[in-house]
Image (spheres, helix red, strand yellow):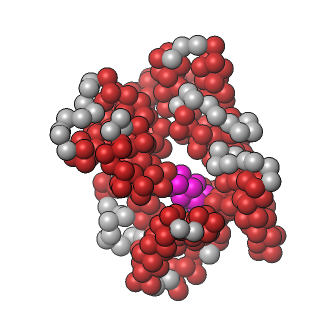
Amino acid sequence: MNESKRYDALDGVRVLAMTGILVMHVLANLSYRDELATLYSYIMYFGRFTSLFMMVSAFSVSCGYYKKIQSGFSNIEKFYSKRYAKILPFFAFITLIDVLLSFSKESIFEGFANITLVFGLIPHESISVIGVGWTLGVIFVFYLLYPFVVYLMKNRIRFCLAYIATLIYAFVVNDYFGLGKVDFLFCACYFMGGAWLFLNKEKIEQKGKRAHLLLAIIGLSALYYICAFKLKWALNIVQYILFLIICMYAIVVSNKKTLLSNKIVGFLSTISLEIYLCHMVAYRIVEKLHLMRVFNNAVASYIFVCAFVFVCAVIGSILFQKVYRLAYDKYLKRSAL
């Protein structure tokens, strides 16, 4: 298997998921969302793109580390060090800002939990400091368990049994144990789905038909909303299949000119996690500047707010990366030598 190949269209899927979550959160917090009731009934489901984000994350980390960990070429210390280095600096920075803005005993405790990155182990986690960070907590639990996932992936039968178990868990933990989307066992099937896509990526590339997969995405998207409004019991099943097929389509069209793979999308994908983590901080800036309703038309105002929040989040993410890189090169790198 060629793990060095870059599946750039999956970068586009990551950006798509991040953008969908952003526009959903903006709409959910607008004071005039009742004027956008029809739009809201559809966009509210974009919040489920967090699961798509998890699926892509599992595929991406497998591309980078599956073969290395399996062969022993990359030691576990290096794997975990890179995970912390990638995630912690920006998350700790915006956590500090949030704690200072809402300073209290509770925010200090929650901020502490955030910067350890293991808050995803807390049952029914409901941390309000960087509330959207729950996704990061769940993803980091997957990183903690990834060497074990590699062990499962080395044997097809073992992996299939584990995969089926996570699919069953997704229903059992919700119905019987009362766990939800912020709990790892509820989300585990999406990570295993990403691992399954990785193990079968060559078959998908060879046998996947671009037109067929695109038609399946369109059909399943329509079915998804039918389920959302009429057949809620089937919603999670259709969603899971839809996300798998979206990723399969991205694998098939990678390294071809599409909307999912271009220089702009490629760049945004490198800061997609940062944009996701700070977009609600950017939203609060819009609130403070009294730019929530700059037009009489509610739809136009909503689009403006989404665009403003997106641009602020992008600029903030870029500035932090540049400042952090300068500080690292000048101080931290030197002290590490």
Stretch in magenta: 48-60
Residue at the location (54% across, 13% down)?
103
Residue at the location (63% across, 18% down)?
106
Closer-to-camera residue (63/239): 239
Q: Is residue 111 left or right of residue 169?
A: left
Closer-to-camera residue (173/260): 173
Main SS class of the magenta portion in the image: helix
Residue at the location (42% across, 42% down)?
28
Q: Is residue 311 left or right of residue 53?
A: left
x and y percentages locating residue 164 in the rendered image? 76, 69
Quarter-wise, where is residue 336 in the image?
Answer: top right
Q: Is residue 52 magenta?
A: yes
Q: How many marks?
A: 0
Residue at the location (73% across, 36% down)?
122
Q: Is residue 225 magenta?
A: no
Vertical order, 269 against 161 (above or below): above
Asked if residue 113 shows in the view, the reply is: yes
Vertical order, 225 against 208 (above or below): above
Quarter-wise, where is residue 311 in the image?
Answer: top left
Q: Where does the N terminus fall, quadrant-wise?
A: bottom right
Quarter-wise, where is residue 112 in the image?
Answer: top right
x and y percentages locating residue 142 in the rendered image? 68, 49
Q: Residue furthest top?
A: 104
Vertical order, 19 against 110 (above or below): below
Asked if residue 279 shows in the view, the reply is: no
Closer-to-camera residue (300/242): 300
x and y percentages locating residue 232 in the rendered image? 59, 64
x and y percentages locating residue 216 in the rendered image? 47, 79
